[in-house]
Amino acid sequence: MSDPVSLAALAPIATVVVLLEVAAGTTVASYTVDLIGKVGRGFAGTTALICAGVMGIDVLIEALLPAGTSLLGAPLPPGSQASLLHWSIAFTGALLGYALFCAVGTDAARRVIGVVAIGFGAMAIAKCAAAFGPSLGGVVTAAVAFVPAALVAGSALAGMLLGHWYLVAPSLSFRPLRRAIDIVFAAVAFQGVVIALVILRSGTTVRGELLTGGDALPFWLLVIGSGIVFTTGVALLTRHFARIRANQPATAMMYVLIISVVMGVVPAHLLFFQTGAPI
């Protein structure tokens, strides 16, 4: 295996991936919560605008990524960065269109455009996997790392934004917030299963590095400790506050949840970029 890329060189790549995951995952989670809980067009449109802002930052960083970027000693496929940039811009435009339809369109129309935006987000994630995956073991390998992370990060941010929405709509039922926390639980469980399967299927060298070697501390402390265990604990506490209709502490816990998710997702991606194990 080639020498790993330095953390300084990996930072912008990890930022591009995480911001895209956050925007795509939040779009999916907020759409689902709105569909199940009937939160309303205001929440859906505001969330879409926030995700478009996140993607605006992501597009800027993508445009500044140097040509010839490589991971694990292998250069990215020709044209992959440009394709990712184009689909990221398209996803940003779709989010802006979704926000517009939430403001002026019918409920049926905005939900159709919401599905379109989700589709563009999925394509952007796929292009991200196609750009970085071949250097790290394959496109599917990268998707295994990116999709669960998108669901976890997106569900956490969507829940936090929903918690704040109760300041705008204080009469809103707490059912949507409970459903948002349920999505967090499902996403974390999915990510935990994926990590376990990746570890079991990894080679002896990579598994040893992650479990007992030089990468064991960030893996156990951050990826597992913060990203899985602590995140689950905070989600349980948030669910309790939502059940007793205590919105302020539930929203405060959502901030803690986002921090714990980021502390798990970012190190997981950095370890993926350095070892090729899609945790």
Image (cartoon, rainbow, N blue to C red):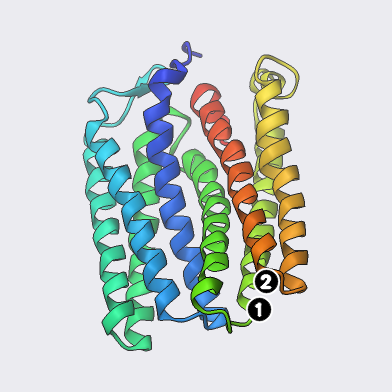
The answer, for residue 229, to whether it is visible in the render is yes
Tell me which amino acid carries mark 2.
Answer: Arg
The answer, for residue 80, to whether it is visible in the render is no
Task: Residue 197: name its quadrant.
Answer: top right
Q: Position of residue 270 (x, y in %)?
A: 52, 28
Residue 165 sits above or below residue 256 on the image: below
> Residue 175: which disc?
1
Please identify the residue farthest to the top as the structure is shown. Answer: 3
Residue 271 sits above or below residue 19 on the image: above
Q: Secondary structure at mark 2?
A: helix
Foreground pick, 15 / 255? 255
Foreground pick, 266 / 214? 266
For label 1, count other residues whose C-alpha is less than 10 Å away and answer few (under 14), some (14-19) or many (20+).
some
Point 38% across, 57% down: residue: 51
Disc 2 target residue: 178
Specify the quadrant that holds the C terminus.
top right
Point 32% across, 28% down: residue: 76
For marks 1 and 2, give the CA distance: 5 Å
Left or right, residue 244 beside residue 175: right
Residue 14 sits above or below residue 27 on the image: above
Task: Residue 252: name its quadrant.
Answer: bottom right
Left or right, residue 101 beside residue 16: left
Q: Position of residue 259 (x, y in %)?
A: 59, 43
Task: Residue 179: name its quadrant.
Answer: bottom right
Q: Secondary structure at mark 1?
A: helix
